[in-house]
Image (spheres, rainbow, N blue to C red):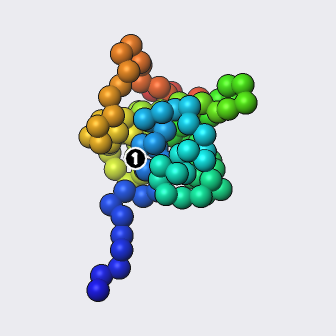
């Protein structure tokens, strides 16, 4: 019997969940992905640290912004390209978001 494996990592699934609704809570994101809220927080922090997303406080909640031009690790493709392949559609008028401190 072969071991179970996933084609897309939990980091990618977290990113996809945020792309569907950037105002979800970490608990809601974790529920989408099938991980605990604590794990969701850790994965979100990883994505933020590596420049894939920016977290902004909006009232008592967080809102996330995906930096679609950041290259995917070990690939020449950018995050936005992967998300579009997975069915994500850029909102009308939405520009490519660059992470803070990164020059295009």
> Which residue is at the far bottom?
1
x and y, in percent, of residue 91 in the image? 38, 21
> Which residue is at the far left?
85
x and y, in percent, of residue 26 in the image? 61, 45
Q: Residue at x 33, y 34 (%)?
A: 88
The image quarter containing residue 35 is bottom right
Q: Nearer the viewer, residue 33 or 19?
A: 33
Q: Residue at x 29, y 86 (%)?
A: 1
Residue 61 in view of the camera: yes
Left or right position of 56 against 21: right
**Label 1 environment density (alpha carbons within 10 Å; few <14, some 14–19, many ≥20):** some
Residue 99 in view of the camera: no
The image quarter containing residue 6 is bottom left
Label count reads 1
The relative height of residue 94 versus residue 11 in the rendered view (above or below) is above
x and y, in percent, of residue 92 in the image? 36, 16
Q: Nearer the viewer, residue 69 or 66?
A: 66
Left or right position of 49 against 94: right
Label 1's element?
loop
> Which residue is at the far right?
60
Q: Residue at x 26, y 40 (%)?
A: 85
The relative height of residue 2 versus residue 94 in the rendered view (above or below) is below
The relative height of residue 78 versus residue 90 in the rendered view (above or below) is below
The C terminus - image quarter:
top left
x and y, in percent, of residue 95 in the image? 41, 19
Q: Residue at x 32, y 28 (%)?
A: 89
Q: Which residue is mark 1?
A: 72
């Amino acid at each position: 019997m072969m071991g179970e494996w996933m084609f897309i990592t939990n980091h990618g699934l977290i990113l996809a969940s945020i792309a569907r609704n950037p105002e979800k809570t970490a608990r809601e994101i974790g529920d989408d992905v099938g991980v605990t809220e604590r794990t969701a927080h850790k994965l979100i922090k990883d994505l933020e640290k590596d420049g894939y997303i920016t977290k902004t406080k909006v009232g008592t909640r967080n809102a996330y912004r995906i930096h679609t031009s950041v290259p995917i690790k070990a690939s020449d493709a950018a995050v936005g390209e992967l998300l579009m392949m997975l069915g994500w559609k850029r909102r009308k008028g939405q520009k490519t978001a660059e992470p803070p401190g990164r020059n295009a």
